[in-house]
Image: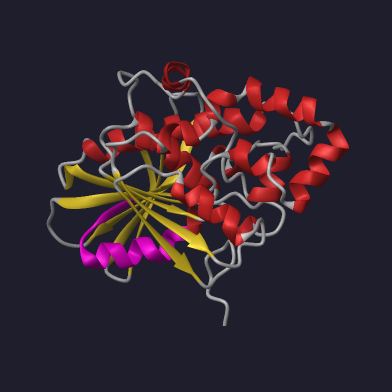
Amino acid sequence: MGWMTLLLGCAAVLASANTDEGSTRFGYDRSIPLDVGVHSTTQRGGASILDLDYASPRGGRVPAYLVIPQRRGPFPAVIYGHWVNLKNSPENSNRSEFLEEAILLARAGAVTLLPDAPSARPGFKEDSDPFSPQDAAVLAHQVADVRRGVDLLAARPDVHTNRIAYVGHSFGAAVGGVLRGVEPHIQALVLMAGVSSMRALLMSDEPRMVEFRTKYGEQRVKQYLDDFDWADAVQYVTQPGKARVLVQVATHDEFGRETNFRRQAELVAEPRTIQWYDATHALINNE
């Protein structure tokens, strides 16, 4: 993947999108069979953990964990979207990032689905071109796969179909931002250390952004932003009247100034709540 993955954990992509084009780009055929395959089931901490996969509407298979309470439902459900930090934290850049939280939620009485993003699947190769279309393509692929995950949960008799939420970190937050605008079956979202507008960040006074524009030229950067504007989370998280959002922001995020991240958080339309944490981009407390 390109420079956005390395700098921002693929926190978001681009800006000023056309909503109709975005809806088309993130759409899929709901009539495609889910074709769920369960490979193993383990018991841990009062939860059943199913290692499974299902058919991606964009081709291939989506590896995922399904974590289920060991009691009778129906239950609310949560889909988790992990971050993508392949350079610095590859061991957590997959469905395992939130597995411990999923087990805790199972004890509390919730079903969780934890899918791998395309970047965590066998055969994925990063494109080193900073202007590659790969970032936008991966985002669109993951949005479609999560929407298919909503279908998987809704098809289960132990899930309340009107009580499905989404939690995403960094890249997963960008996915959640788009989901807010295109997936009506998700009733609430938590966006952790995400970026609402990539254009605003890339064209900002952040030193890394200034350096990038200086190296490649502002015109080339702007053309790239224009070419992939349909993939920007800002087009979707700024739509009013959508699902409620909790925005979680780090005061010591290493990818930018607190003031810029404050502006990014405030772009999210109501209904939303913004909470700050004494933490880095990983949202781990600074102690």
At which x and y percent is residue 37?
37, 38
Q: Is residue 222 above or below residue 93?
A: above
Q: Is residue 197 above or below residue 60?
A: below
- Residue drawn at point x = 47 percent, y = 16 percent: 21
Q: Is residue 214 above or below residue 20?
A: below
Say which of 228 and 137 sits in front. Answer: 228
Left or right of 142 in this view: 131: right
Say which of 7 and 15 sits in front. Answer: 15
Q: Is residue 194 above or below residue 200?
A: below
Say which of 82 and 232 sits in front. Answer: 232
Residue 122 location, quadrant = top right
In the picture, which quadrant includes the C terminus?
bottom right
Write down the region rendered in magenta.
98-112
In the image as oriented, which residue stretches furthest toward the right? Answer: 215
Taken as a whole, is the magenta stretch helix, strand or loop? helix
Q: Is there any visible trace of residue 36 in the rendered image? A: no
Left or right of 12 in this view: 158: left
- Residue drawn at point x = 53 percent, y = 75 percent: 285
Residue 54 location, quadrant = top left
Magenta stretch holds residue 107: yes
At which x and y percent is residue 216?
85, 33
Q: Is there any visible trace of residue 138 in the rendered image? A: yes
At which x and y percent is residue 237?
41, 38
Left or right of 195 in this view: 154: left
Say which of 78 and 242 sits in front. Answer: 242
At which x and y percent is residue 114?
41, 49
- Residue drawn at point x = 80 percent, y = 38 percent: 213
In the picture, which quadrant includes the N terminus?
top right
Magenta stretch holds residue 23: no
